[in-house]
Structures are given as structure tokens and as C-alpha cells.
Image: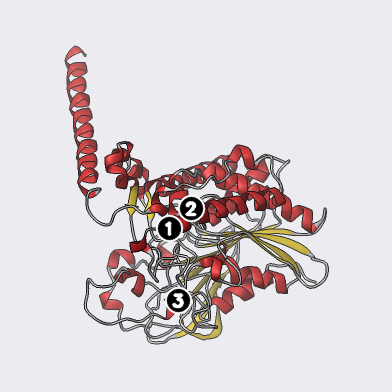
């Protein structure tokens, strides 16, 4: 045994040395990388005094809006008013003279909002945007709820909507506390018996799901009657697990840029283009908490106390894991009326030979065989020679699939939807292909089709190729309406 122990000790020591060497290489690469590319600007270094979880637990909605106003005033004072002459350009959202400067608009959708229905509300909904995003991303879903008699509360999650630096210090517990605050306001506005829904997009989807499970474990929290998630962040890239290592050199001021995974021009009025390491770290931690909570409640047989979930997910999603949504959430659900809607890629396009096989799975390879405890709907081509779309529906507990024609067609030049496309109709003014009205916010990114030489645009080429609007938004909107209680 002594010889075996010595052998194990040698190999353990060698493995430890190898791990240290890998960490040192990562840090060295990040040190070198931090010295290249554009310099950090005021919006990367001035961190607004956004609220923390311990403060949010003591606030109501009015207090949150007042604190939010102070944060935006701080950004105006510490960033906008101090921008150096060389940064006062038309494509900089933080320059007061830019056509994309959000305070110029009739409504700044970076801020939390409330949409009131005509007459007394028959319910309330909280809408939670995604990472680096703003309340704008669920604007159209909010309008849908308002038209259906609900008061819609669009929550600006702490660290968002102001400057990218806000995400260098925010933690997921702050986001969760803000979600609880907004749900409390929704319950107040809906009354003691009115329905309360929560809608989450991407990272906001993770927050919505987590709150619904928190309410199972803590009866003092507002229990939503329905959870609707769009591209929910249940799982992210394994790289996010180690993102914190990439930011270690930033502990030294000389290498402050190492705290950022990307530093890009800020030409989008309602979304950060620059991405800090901390944002990746917090998203990973949130998904780990979410997955652990699902497993814990499933083992205890308590998930049947959770509100039904209606989830919309693109099969191809470079930001979140479609497989994690199935394996780490839906596969654990009891039969409680939940449904997963998957937007398949365009099987009728003639571009299939250009797609990487590793990123082109069949839906059937991702979902368990029927019967399942939840309804599965797959929006896909009628066959591989057709652009006509059908819904393939398998009810919870059933094994037979029903095929329902949709009367819609996949656009010929679109090979799939994307993570960012689902919540936006084709007419969205910022992200839509046919913006109405055009350039309402100084720019119409979704209608941008640029051809020319490479290496000269401030935009990454991937952002021009990635679809930012959903040709099947009317279907999604109708499914959300069906989830509402009858009038």
C-alpha cells in the first residue's frame, strides 16, 4: 500500500502542477490580450450606484423607480457630460448629440416601465429582459398583455440599461431581488385574486423560472399563475465556468481591460455591445443555482406546486443551450400543464450543405421519447422540399403526433432563427426587417444589409448575419394569448 500511496501522491502532484500551468497560461494570454484593441471608455469604467439585493428587499416599486431615476442622473452627470471630444460621434449612444442617444426618444426603453390597460386591469404581468439587454426586448409582449386587459410591468434589472460598467459589479442575487420586488407590485396591482404572470427572456427567463421555484419553497413570495419564457438561459457554454480566470489580471490597474471579454462600439440604444467577464460569471452561477433547485424540488416531489411553464426556444441557439432546457428542466417536470415550443431550422432551404453538422441536430435527438409529462410543439417545414410550415404537436402523456398546418412559410433566405430573434416581430423598429416606423430610435439594425470590403465596419460581421427578428412572432403571440385566462 505504501508504494501505491507514493504513486498516487506523485500523480496528484503532477496533476496539480499541470493545472497551475494551465491557469498561468490563461492569465498570460489575458495579460497580452488586455494590451490590444480599443481602450476602455468612461462607460466601461464609471460604475453606477445601482441597488443591491439587501436594499431591494426593503423597497417597493415606487422606491425602485426613484432609485432608478437617481442612477440615470448619475450616468448623465458622470458619463454623458464628461465624454471627451473624440468620443462625441454619431454612432455612440452615450453622446448627447447622437441620434441614438436614448434620452432623445419619446420613451427611453432602457428604463422600467408600466403599461396600463383601458379600464380596470384584470391581471398583471412582470416582464424581465435578458443579459446586457433592456426592457425594450419584451416591449411587444408587454403591449400584447396590455391589449388583453393586463397591467404590464417591464423591469429594468440592476446593472442594465445604463452603461456596460454596471455589469462589472452586479450579481445574480441583485437580479433575483429585483424580480421579487416587481412580482410584489404585480400582486398589488392585480388584487388578491387577479392572475399574475411572469415573462422572461434569456437571462430573464432563468430569473422567471427561479422565482417560480422560489415561490414553491417560500410561501411568502408571490406565486405566479403562469410562467412564459423566451430563449431561457437554463444552461450556457462550459467556458462560462472558467470565465472568472480570464478576469484575474484586472486586479492590477494596468490590465483593467482583462475584466472585459469584448470592448466594442456602443451603437445599440437598448443593448450593451461590450461584455464584461462578470456578466458571464453571474449567468453561469445563476444557471447552476437554477439547475440545482430543479433537481432538489424534483427529488422532493414538489415541482407540481410550480406554475405551468410555456417555453419558446430556437433549435439553433449560440447563446444558451437548447439541450439544457430539455434535460435540466423539462425532463424533470411533472404533468402540470407545461409546454415546450421549438422553432426548428429551415429544413427546406438549399443552404443545408453549408451548415456545420455539429450545430444541426434533429429535434428528436434532443427530446426524450414520448410519452412525456409536457406538451411538445415543433414548428418545422412540412417536408424537406417545402418552405410551408406546420406545427408537430405531441400532447402530454401521448405518443401520437398531430400535424397542424400553420399557413406560414419559412423565409427562403433564412436558415434558422437565433437566440436574439424570438421576441421581435418583423416590424420592430430597431430589430425588424421591415421596421415600422423606420429609424424610430435613430437606427434600424434588423434592416441593415451591407455589402463591401471586410475590416472597415464598426459592427462585427456576425451581427449582420444573425437574424434579429422572428418571422413566426404572430404564432408566438397567439400562443401567449391562449395562455391567458378567458375574459
Label 2 CA crowd tier, 10 Å (few <14, some 14–19, many 20+): many
Residue 134: percent from left, percent from top:
53, 61
Dot 3 or dot 2, earlier in sequence: 2
Q: Secondary structure at mark 3?
A: loop
Q: Residues within 10 Å of mark 1 (few under 14, many from 20)?
A: many
Relative height, residue 299 to residue 315 (above, below): above
Q: Looking at the rendering, which quadrant does residue 336 occupy?
A: bottom right
Closer-to-camera residue (73/344): 73
Q: How many marks?
A: 3
Q: Picture coordinates of residue 190 (x, y %)?
A: 78, 58
Identify residue for label 2: 234
As drawn, is 126 to the left or to the right of 187? Answer: left
Quadrant (top left, top right, bottom left, bottom right) of the N terminus:
top left
State whether residue 399 appears in this view. no
The answer to whether residue 191 of the structure is visible from this angle is yes
Q: For the residues marked 3 and 2, what is the alpha-carbon distance in whole angstroms?
A: 32 Å
Q: Secondary structure at mark 2?
A: loop
Q: Which quarter of the image is occupied by the C terminus?
A: bottom right
Evaluate if marks 1 and 3 touch, with contact meaning CB atoms under 8 Å apart: no
Q: Is residue 396 left or right of residue 239?
A: right
Query: Marks 1 and 2, how far apart in space?
Result: 7 Å
Q: Secondary structure at mark 1?
A: loop
> Residue tagged by mark 3?
443
Whether tag 1 and tag 2 are in contact, CB under 8 A, the answer is: yes
Which disc is residue 320 wearing? Answer: 1
Q: Residue at x 44, y 48 (%)?
A: 46
- Label placed on residue 266: none
Q: Is residue 1 above or below residue 279?
A: above
Across and down, in percent, residue 319 comes to 40, 59
Amino acid at each position: 500500500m505504501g508504494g501505491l500511496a507514493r504513486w498516487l501522491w506523485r500523480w496528484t502532484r503532477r496533476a496539480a502542477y499541470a493545472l497551475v500551468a494551465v491557469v498561468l497560461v490563461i492569465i498570460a494570454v489575458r495579460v497580452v490580450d488586455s494590451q490590444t484593441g480599443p481602450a476602455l471608455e468612461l462607460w466601461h469604467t464609471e460604475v453606477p450606484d445601482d441597488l443591491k439585493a439587501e436594499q431591494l428587499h426593503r423597497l417597493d416599486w415606487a422606491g425602485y423607480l426613484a432609485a432608478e431615476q437617481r442612477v440615470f442622473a448619475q450616468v448623465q452627470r458622470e458619463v454623458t457630460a464628461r465624454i471627451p471630444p473624440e468620443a462625441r460621434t454619431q454612432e455612440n449612444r452615450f453622446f448627447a448629440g447622437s441620434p441614438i442617444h436614448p434620452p432623445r426618444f419619446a420613451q427611453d426603453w432602457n428604463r422600467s416601465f408600466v403599461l396600463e390597460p383601458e379600464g380596470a386591469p384584470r391581471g398583471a404581468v412582470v416582464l424581465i429582459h435578458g443579459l446586457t439587454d433592456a426592457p425594450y426586448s419584451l416591449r411587444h409582449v408587454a403591449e400584447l398583455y396590455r391589449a388583453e386587459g393586463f397591467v404590464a410591468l417591464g423591469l429594468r434589472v440592476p446593472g442594465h440599461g445604463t452603461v456596460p460598467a454596471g455589469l462589472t459589479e452586479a450579481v445574480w442575487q441583485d437580479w433575483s431581488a429585483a424580480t421579487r420586488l416587481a412580482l410584489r407590485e404585480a400582486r398589488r396591482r392585480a388584487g388578491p385574486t387577479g392572475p399574475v404572470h411572469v415573462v422572461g427572456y434569456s437571462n430573464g427567463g432563468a430569473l422567471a423560472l427561479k422565482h417560480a421555484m422560489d415561490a414553491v419553497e417560500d410561501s411568502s413570495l408571490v406565486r405566479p399563475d403562469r410562467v412564459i419564457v423566451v430563449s431561457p438561459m437554463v444552461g450556457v457554454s462550459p467556458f462560462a465556468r472558467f470565465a472568472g480566470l480570464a478576469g484575474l489580471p484586472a486586479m492590477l490597474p494596468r490590465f483593467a481591460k482583462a475584466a472585459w471579454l469584448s470592448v466594442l462600439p456602443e451603437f445599440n440604444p437598448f443593448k450593451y455591445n461590450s461584455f464584461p467577464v462578470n456578466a458571464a460569471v453571474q449567468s453561469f452561477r445563476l444557471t447552476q443555482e437554477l439547475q440545482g433547485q430543479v433537481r432538489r424540488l424534483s427529488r422532493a416531489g414538489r415541482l407540481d406546486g410550480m406554475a405551468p411553464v410555456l417555453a419558446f426556444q430556437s433549435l439553433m441557439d449560440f447563446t444558451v443551450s437548447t439541450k439544457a432546457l430539455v434535460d435540466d428542466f423539462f425532463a424533470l417536470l411533472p404533468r402540470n400543464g407545461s409546454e415546450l415550443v421549438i422553432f426548428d431550422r429551415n429544413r427546406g432551404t438549399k443552404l443545408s450543405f453549408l451548415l456545420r453538422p455539429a450545430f444541426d441536430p434533429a429535434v428528436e435527438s434532443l427530446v426524450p421519447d414520448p410519452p412525456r409529462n409536457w406538451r411538445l410543439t415543433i414548428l418545422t417545414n412540412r417536408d424537406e422540399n417545402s418552405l410551408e410550415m406546420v406545427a408537430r404537436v405531441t400532447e402530454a402523456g401521448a405518443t401520437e403526433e398531430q400535424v397542424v398546418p400553420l399557413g406560414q412559410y419559412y423565409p427562403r433566405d433564412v436558415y434558422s432563427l437565433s437566440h436574439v430573434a424570438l421576441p421581435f416581430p418583423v416590424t420592430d423598429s430597431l430589430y425588424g426587417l421591415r421596421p415600422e416606423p423606420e429609424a424610430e430610435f435613430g437606427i434600424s439594425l434588423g434592416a441593415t444589409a451591407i455589402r463591401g470590403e471586410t475590416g472597415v465596419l464598426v459592427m462585427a460581421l456576425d451581427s449582420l448575419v444573425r437574424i434579429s427578428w422572428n418571422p413566426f412572432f404572430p404564432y408566438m403571440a397567439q400562443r401567449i394569448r391562449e395562455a391567458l385566462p378567458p375574459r
